[in-house]
Image (tube, rainbow, N blue to C red):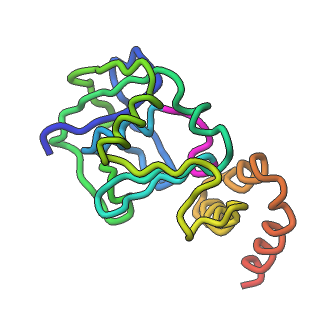
Amino acid sequence: MNIVYHGSPNSNIKEIVAHKSTHQKECIYATDNKVVALLFMGRGNGDLDTRISNINGKPELVERREGVLKKLYDKEGYLYELDGSSFNHYDFLWSLEVISFEKSIIPLRKTFYPNILETLKKEEQKGNIIIYRYPNRPKDIPLDNSDLIDKYIGFENQGVTGAIDKLLQIYPEFGSLVQNKAKIKNKK
């Protein structure tokens, strides 16, 4: 890869440093798709706010709760271009992301976006992204977002400490369901 992109709300990144994420590996995340990088400029609660997926090579964004897109993206953001030579895709990654195991990387260039949400709307009009605004969503996502329960129990079981607590902080109504599923998993 020649160039990859890293989206951030931070305007003064001089060096991107590796960190551990849900994959439990110290690495730097990026993408070769500019629209995907735009999606990572907004900081929130990750999958608990939106679902970002790949539909035939095109990013799809699903707003899980009313007002989340405005909260996450109605603000400025920065697109950092990085030398892609140390980045690779791995089977355990989402299909539109790549990682580097370098300890740090200095960006080649930075582009300012005054309003991420407006930019995403333009990209949607061009056909470069599919956006579902709450309550609209694909059929595989229930309106109550209960698809997150097994996912976050799985994160916790993989060593992502606090994943279930974060889920219940945003969706306290899942308390008894999570407790029942966790009991079942512990018996196995």
Could you tell me residue 108's position as x and y percent? 21, 23
Magenta stretch containing residue 44, yes or no? yes
Q: Give me the residue at 53% from left, 53% from top.
A: 51
Number of labelled discs? 0
Extreme front residue here? 125
Extreme right residue here? 176
Range drawn in magenta:
42-48
Residue 41 lies in what quarter of the image? top left
Q: Quadrant of the C terminus?
A: bottom right
Extreme top residue here? 12
Please indicate whether residue 152 sits to the left or right of residue 170 in the image: left
Please indicate whether residue 55 sits to the left or right of residue 180 in the image: left
Q: Give me the residue at 87% from left, 66% from top.
A: 176
Please indicate whether residue 14 sits to the left or right of residue 183 in the image: left
Residue closer to the observer: 29 or 80 = 80
Could you tell me residue 147's position as x and y percent? 64, 66
Q: Quadrant of the N terminus?
A: top left
Residue 35 against residue 138 in the figure, above or below: above
Q: Give me the residue at 66% from left, 38% from top.
A: 67
Q: Give me the residue at 42% from left, 18% from top.
A: 114
Residue 155 against residue 80 in the figure, above or below: below
Please indicate whether residue 87 sits to the left or right of residue 151 in the image: left
Could you tell me residue 5's position as x and y percent? 28, 36
Residue 135 against residue 45 in the figure, above or below: below
Could you tell me residue 116's position as x and y percent? 44, 28
Extreme bottom residue here? 188
Magenta stretch containing residue 104, yes or no? no
